[in-house]
Amino acid sequence: MSISKYYANHSLIGQITTFLPNRLLYTLFFVFIFQCMCAQNATDIIMLSSGWQMREVSTEKWMQAVVPGCVHSDLLRNNVIPDPYYRTNEKNLQWIDKKDWEYKTSFTISDKYYKKEHIELIFKGLDTFSDVYLNNQKVLSTDNMFREWVLDSKTFLHVGENSLRIHFRSPITIGLELLKQNGFKLFSPNDQSENGGLTKEQLVSPFIRKAPYHFGWDWGPRFVTSGIWRPAFIRAWTGFKIMDFFVQQQSLTDNLAVLNGQIEIQSTKSQKGDVEISINEKETIKKSVFLKIGINQIQIPFEIKKPKRWWTNGLGKPTLYSIKATVSANQMIERQGTEIGLRTLRLVQKPDKAGHSFYFELNGIPVFAKGENHIPNEMFLDRATHEVYDWEIDTAVKSNLNMLRVWGGGIYEDDYFYQLCDRNGILVWQDFMFACAMYPGNDKFLNSVTQEADYQVKRLRNHPSIALWCGNNEIDVAWQNFNQGKGDWGWKKAYNEQQRTQVWSAYDTIFNKILFKAVNALSPQTPYWQSSPSSIIPKTHSTDTNPNGDAHYWGVWGNKHPFEKYADNIGRFMSEYGFQSFPELETVKKYALPSDYDIESEVMRHHQRSSIGNANIKEYMDMYYRKPINFEKFLYVGQVLQAYGIKFAIESHRRAMPYNMGSLVWQINDCWPVASWSSSDYFHRWKALQYEIKRSFEPIIISVFSKSDSTSISIVSDKLTRISAQLEISTCDFSGKVLQTQFLPVIVNPNGVTSVSTQQTSKLTNNPNGTYLSLSLRVKDQIVTKKTYFFTQPKNLTLTKPNIITKIEKKNLSWVVSLKTDYLAKDLYLNFPGVEGSFSDNYFDLIPGKERIITFIPKDKKMLPSSIELISLVDSY
Ligand code: BMA
């Protein structure tokens, strides 16, 4: 078999290559070579990424396997199972999680390698219950997908070929044993046990430290995976090894950043050594140290003069510094590097008249969090490649986001995800992986959670993007709601007194003690928030309007409140709200046949996991739009509907600044092709909503809000300076004829809202169904933002078919589309059938008379412009 062998320093340079300029890289390389000539690497790594085979335990046939990976992906690659996402295939694949699976490989250890003092076997992630065998000897048992496993393994190894075998035990079999031991069930309403061939009562997910969404969710299938899901390797070292490198910021001013490099070193002997910290490969700080046997905590204070700060997307550059620690002792050397961002970040919770504020203050500036919730990008996590994360963060940046919430029902994300957030100025609200369930409180479970929390907080603490650690998603509120009698989740009711005490005590231990302690001890400058949403709700308020902490508002959707209710249900930080849509036809084609093209067909229902999903979409569509003529138009109107509702929410949230300081849409992505709340679908096609989010989160927006006969116009600005501008407000008919115009001088408030005017709607139009407001904000003859506002719901508009003239030209790598219409084209959708790519804007209102230029970047750069498909609202009924 072949093994791939990397030196630790090589892999470090490999990581750095992606962001350092070439000249620096060469310097780095020569420094590295030079140092190698003088000293030996303390650490030597053999990646265990090749030669893997897998089989079902107790069967004969071994199949080729890919590591990192999972059983489902390997079975698919070996043609044992069909595409799990196609039609209803998921149903027939539930047998996989009831079986045990085995993985094996072998690797060679040279004489020289074996001479190293320590040889460790390291797994960055094993999913989940496994027994690990080295040369047929059981060396490790695992039970937590979210932990790293490090095993001193020299005694089990020898020079020459060694075998490694991992026996994954069925998570369902073990889960059922754990449930039995608990004596009663733990609530977990998203666990689709019945789809997995179990009973309603057989909810095993809370007992297993494994991604909750693998057991099903209201946007996801049930695939309970097993496998070596993150890298595995052997690490040999002599003398010492760096265990951790943490750069803590002590203070930050415009002149000086005072930092402390904390290097955790394990040493096998008492020895003198040198520790060096370098900043951007330029400045270095050296310190002589004495290493004792065992764990050494070395502190190296250092400074950066005239520091450049890390800013979020929209506010400034997310400057990063590359900091590297080099430890040398007794002719041995080891390095570890990290990227840091210099910023002050506070969660401000000041008491005020209403309750308590809840906002993030970055470098002294209160930041309105413009964001979305993130779920895992895949059911089978090996498929979430760097390209997928590149796409997601690129989407976030282009959509004017400055925050993503890594939601607690998924996974602690890949290092690369956080690197991208660091490099692009995206803050991360990081949940611990607990969601919508109660959890056990036995010692083994609590110990496992403690290990997991310590590992994850340490792993992520250097990332400037991490803004907050949150204990869980919606558990506290689900439990507490029992007392309020409203929105009761029914959990407490189902337990007797003694069970309640037991269940709550486990909650209290995990979320108020273990997780709090981990954050407080290991990343003390990062705030810890016990649960999202906050349950500190005064009796006079509901969860939806909680004047303290963060809020999830699901009255729109869950309680079928009209979209207009978004304006009345605003908390201090809206961390969740959303509305569903189906993906576009091209995506539906990937999982359904034309004979399935009806949202009530078996296949389409299978790809809709919310029990109220289809009925809700139809009901809201009836409220706001006319009935679409066919399936394809239903998909289109569904997307436009979703965008219409969420646009109203975002604007309401932004207008409520500074009372409300956050708006995180549920949810940015999908983990398979499905009807869901996502703004972009599984194949990375932006839905109408993604374009709307981009527009609604622009740094400056004009927001128009009408109630009864009153129309008020405000401007929301994230800019930090006051702007002197002029607002032009015109009432136009659908042929573009201007019926009346006003010009208003405006001084736009920095980082806040400016009310410009409130007028009688009837004075602005006497034909609300046939007119719109066209608004533009000008600063010295430059239009900084524009808005088209309709006085009535889309279904009331008296639209006629527009005649749109298009011109398409290829310019360098993009296609330039110019569009001109004689008549309003409402929610115009552009598509190049069969050509994948991205539009600069889509699903927009094309205003008559004015030419609009849109660029399209095809994925395949060699493609030549083809004919364009245009759909606007009038085509849908
Ligand atoms: C929120 C989330 C998820 C869920 C979504 C849609 O409450 O926390 O649990 O998928 O609603 O129902």
Image: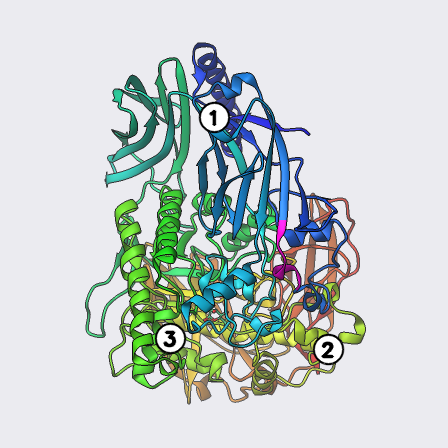
**Tag 3 secondary structure:** helix
Q: Earlier in the sequence, mark 1 or mark 2?
A: 1
- Magenta run includes residue 97: yes
Q: Is residue 545 visible?
A: no
SS type, badge 2 = helix
Residue toward you, 844 or 566: 566
Q: How many marks?
A: 3
Residue 47, magenta (yes or no) = no
Relative to 577, is 138 above or below?
Answer: above
The answer to which quarter of the image holds residue 332 is top left
- Span highlighted in magenta in the image: 95-101
| Residue at far top of view | 38
Indicate left or right for 35 with 720 as reference. right
Residue 811, compared with residue 627, is above or below; it is: above
To which residue does mark 3 refer?
A: 478
Q: What residue would you read off at disc 1?
A: 236
